Amino acid sequence: MDKLPTRLAEHPTVRAVRSRPAAQAGVIDADWLRAVCLDAGVDDVGFASVADPELSSELPHVETALPGAVSYVSLVVKMNRDNV
């Protein structure tokens, strides 16, 4: 979380959250997360590691937007192709 831009790091809400004691991060079960996503209405869901070499072009964006992220969650929602 030290990679946050200064402006964001100084925001009152960010400062309040960062002042709390850090909770021990746990591992989220992929089957459980898949079920949560599907129950929320997505048509399909997939997971990938941020460390996957095939996704290395995404790393700068992820480190800026979500510092410390270790996984991607891809949500797929079908569209009406006639309207595209």
Image (spheres, rainbow, N blue to C red):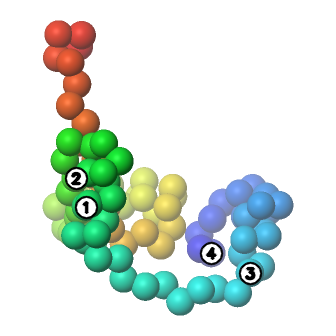
The residue labelled by disc 1 is 34
In this rendering, the answer to whether 43 lies above or below 56 is: above
- Please tell me how crowded label 4 is: few (under 14), some (14-19), or many (20+) other residues with Cα within 10 Å: few
Amino acid identity at mark 4: Asp
In this rendering, the answer to whether 14 lies above or below 7 is: below
Q: How far apart are marks 4 and 2 (CA)?
A: 30 Å
Spot occupied by residue 30 in the image (x, y as percentages of width and height): 25, 71
- Nearer the N terminus, badge 4 or badge 1? 4
Spot occupied by residue 44 in the image (x, y as percentages of width and height): 19, 47
The residue labelled by disc 3 is 20
Pick out the residue farthest to the top: 82
Image quadrant holding the N terminus, namely: bottom right
Task: Give left or right: position of 24 versus 76.
Answer: right
The residue labelled by disc 2 is 45
The residue labelled by disc 4 is 2
- Nearer the N terminus, badge 4 or badge 2? 4
Q: Nearer the viewer, residue 4 or 22?
A: 22
Q: How far apart are marks 1 and 2 (CA)?
A: 6 Å
**Residue, x 29% and y 76% (percent of image)?**
29
